[in-house]
Amino acid sequence: MTEHGKSLTFIVTTNCLLFFISSIGTIVNAFLFNKFATRKGVLSGFYKLCLIKTIPNFIVCISFLLWAVPLGSLQVNSKQIPRSINVFIGQLSGSGAFLMGPLLQVAMASNRFLSLYFAMLTVRKSKYPVTTIWILISTILAVIYTVVGLPGTNLSYVRDSEKNCGFLYIPEEMLWLSEDGECSQFLYDILFYTVLACSIFSNTLNITTAGKLVFDKVAGMSASDSQLRRRMYIRKFSQCVLQDCLHAFDMINCTFIYKMDLSSIWLQFILVMFFFHADVQPKWLRKTFVRNSIISVTPATQVQ
């Protein structure tokens, strides 16, 4: 066990996973950015969104790879890390880039929705750089949110004793957390509710889009082709929903779930009741539990 109560196995496993995932994310997003940026010809609005989306993804992944993984592996005390550098990286990746991702996902979901339900309107609106304007707005918001948390640029209403608005990495907890103070809590609340609102809005559009694609009938298509088409759209819909929920899940995890104490009696009671009480279980879990719980009993025979 380390001085912070974490086993060596936990530290090694966690940082190996972070290294593996962040390495793949960094390489893939760098490749996609180069692939999108070097394409010749006129770029569609959705293509522009895919191109720009690789930038915040790359920033988040490389921040984990070059900052979080080394600090977490060495278990460096957060007090020994230069605050200005830690806050800068935290604000850049954990605030600005993290906020820009959901904003772009809203635009991507809106693009799919409008292209399907209002195709003619989309053609007429294509004369105006709506996508470019939204990308510009998202970038400005991300930059503003990054800058306000940097040292020396704190919000004016905050008292001198509470000018800790930054978002930084804590190696002992292996988490990105806000500093203590009203300022940081105010900024974190804005980030949390903005990401949550973006996730709800984009997934509402995703559900509406998927419903039309799945249930609309196409003339001249056989039943087997229609079923294949429906399965393909369901897979793509699941991918969109998962992608648009990732930021919200991460915020919920960092805000609520990580604070749960597994030794708490109330949490143990909820988990035990959920697992063993069939009335509160979803149908899929109830069927799985019943199927795995069947025990075959055969009468014993006496050997003569």
Image (cartoon, grey):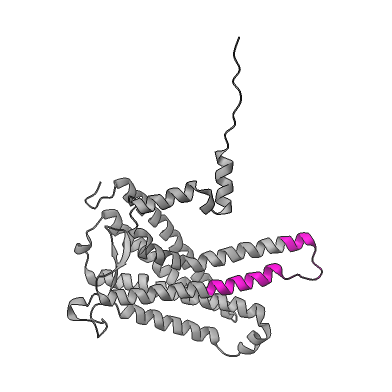
Q: Position of residue 100 (x, y in %)?
A: 43, 76
Residue 233 picture quarter: bottom right
Can residue 52 be seen in this snapshot? no
In this image, 248 relative to 4: left or right?
right
Q: Main secondary structure of the magenta part?
A: helix
Where the C terminus falls, by quadrant?
Answer: top right
Residue visible at 33% across and 77% down in the picture: 187
Q: Residue furthest left?
A: 161
Of residues 235 and 43, the one nearer the viewer is 235
* Residue depicted at 23% across the width and 58% down the height: 76
Which stretch did the figure color magenta? 202-227
| Lateral position of residue 80 relative to residue 301, left or right | left
The residue furthest front is 279
Q: Camera-side residue: 2 or 276?
A: 276
Asked if one can make out residue 258 in the rendered structure from this viewpoint, the answer is yes
Magenta stretch contains residue 207: yes
Specify the quadrant of the image occupied by residue 172: bottom left
Q: Position of residue 26 (x, y in %)?
A: 43, 64
Q: What percent of the width, then of the height, locates residue 83?
A: 22, 70
